[in-house]
Amino acid sequence: MAKKPSEIVDDVLTGKVNISDVDEGIQSWCRFFIYQGAVSVLSLNTKEERRKALLKIPENVRPLVEDEAKRVWAYRRSLT
């Protein structure tokens, strides 16, 4: 039986499946949640809090959130 798209997204975000192993539509959907995770990490007050939050993210998803956080950080800095 085939999985629902929401189940596949959950599998990617929990680290059970690599994002590159799912179709592009699911990857796009996952990127939205990766963006939300990055913004959530950036909203923390200290560098230590941000590090702890990143360590809670599954290993194969963490680099995606880190890269997105860097992208958002750079964008925000460009606005000032």
Image (spheres, rainbow, N blue to C red):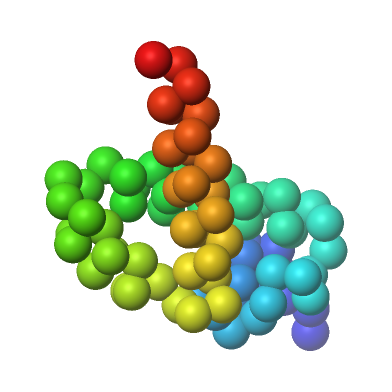
Question: Which residue occupies the foreground of this view, 24 or 54?
Answer: 54
Asked if one can make out residue 13 in the rendered structure from this viewpoint, the answer is no
| Picture residue at 33% right of the left edge, 74% below the top | 55
Where residue 28 sits in the image (x, y, percent)? 71, 50
Question: Which residue occupies the foreground of this view, 18 or 7?
Answer: 18
| Picture residue at 18% right of the left edge, 62% below the top | 48
Asked if one can make out residue 74 in the rendered structure from this viewpoint, the answer is yes
Q: Is residue 30 above or below residue 60?
A: above
| Picture residue at 82% right of the left edge, 56% below the top | 24
Quarter holding residue 19: bottom right
Question: Which residue occupies the foreground of this view, 14 or 56?
Answer: 56
Quarter of the image with the C terminus is top left
Where residue 25 sits in the image (x, y, percent)? 79, 53
Question: Which residue occupies the foreground of this view, 11 or 7?
Answer: 11
Where residue 58 sits in the image (x, y, percent)? 46, 77
Count of labels in the image:
0
Q: Is residue 54 above or below residue 29?
A: below
Where residue 42 sits in the image (x, y, percent)? 32, 45
Quarter of the image with the N terminus is bottom right
Which residue occupies the extreme top position in the image?
80
Q: Is residue 44 left or right of residue 35?
A: left
| Picture residue at 43% right of the left edge, 37% below the top | 73
